[in-house]
Amino acid sequence: MFEIFENLNVCIDNQVYMKPDYLIDPFISGNKYRKLKYNVLQAKKLASKTLLTFGGAYSNHIAAVAAAGSRFGFQTIGIIRGEELINKIQENPTLVYAQKQGMQFYFVSRDAYRKKESPSFIEYLKSQFGNFYLIPEGGTNDLAIKGCEEILTNQDAKFDYITCPVGTGGTISGLINASVNHQKILGFPALKGDFLQKDISKFAKRDNWDLVTDYHFGGYAKINSELISFINEFKSQFNIPLDPIYTGKMVYGVFDLIKKGYFPKDAKILMIHTGGLQGIAGMNHFLKKKNMIKIK
């Protein structure tokens, strides 16, 4: 069902390499493939017919779950944050794609969405949709961590630093658990706040990690012209696209830290490209309204 994926790290320069996990699959991309792998297998084992999950309007996770459901024979339900989006589906590339993959949407208010993990809300959803296999927002659970532990291979032991963007903390937790003793794992959160420390600690089995919180560019989905220019220049130079929400910010941060002398000169750095490229279309839709340069 899910194929073993062996990707070759791309050399950016003598010090920095990138693992192009976004090449795993054009639709179930990067860390979403990793997180969904064992969840889909478990849903099959339980004979579940429906996958239900949560996400925002431009969520990579929503798009990936919709694609996985279509490919592996599940009905899919997306609980979407924001009731105002009910009549705006056609304005949103992510929702259009997910709908074409057969996903059924259920739009809820932001107040209701905050209660998504409460037992009473889950029971309410069961009363509306019947039995389903529940996948958390962002896909992070024990089975997702298991999938993300497979990102690193034996050949990656030569690297001193492993860097990745951080959303819900699942990917970095898997990297931490799969790392070797001499490695330091650095996470670059896409959101403001230090709540992720606690979330990651629930899954991480080592303490060889840290969060670099200086490169969120104002918060989740916040960007500026400097970041867009960096992303476009990076693609022109290395032929590697970066999404503006997660990996683009992480790569910007790594290059900036190198300039500031954060890493030892002989240290080898491996950046994990977690995908998220489907979000570029939605961001460009926003940038066009703001008369800003688009992401290539």
Image: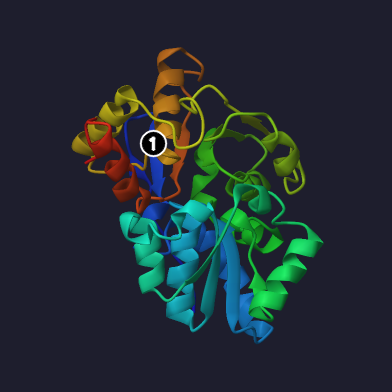
Q: Residue furthest top?
A: 260
Q: Quadrant of residue 41?
A: bottom right
Position of residue 105 measured from the top left corner of the image (x, y, whole percent): 50, 67
Is 37 placed left or right of 259 in the picture? right
Q: Is residue 127 above or below residue 120?
A: below
Total numbered circles: 1
Q: Is residue 201 above or below residue 31?
A: above
Question: Relative to the observer, which residue lies in front, 65 or 291?
Answer: 291
Q: Residue at x 29, y 30 (%)?
A: 228
Q: Residue at x 53, y 21 (%)?
A: 214
Q: Quadrant of residue 237?
A: top left
The amino acid beneath tag 1 is Gly
Position of residue 99 measured from the top left corner of the image (x, y, whole percent): 40, 70
Question: Relative to the observer, which residue lies in front, 108 or 40?
Answer: 108
Q: Quadrant of residue 169?
A: top right
Q: Residue furthest left?
A: 236
Position of residue 2 measured from the top left corner of the image (x, y, whole percent): 49, 74
* Whether residue 149 can be seen here: no
* Whether residue 52 can be seen here: yes
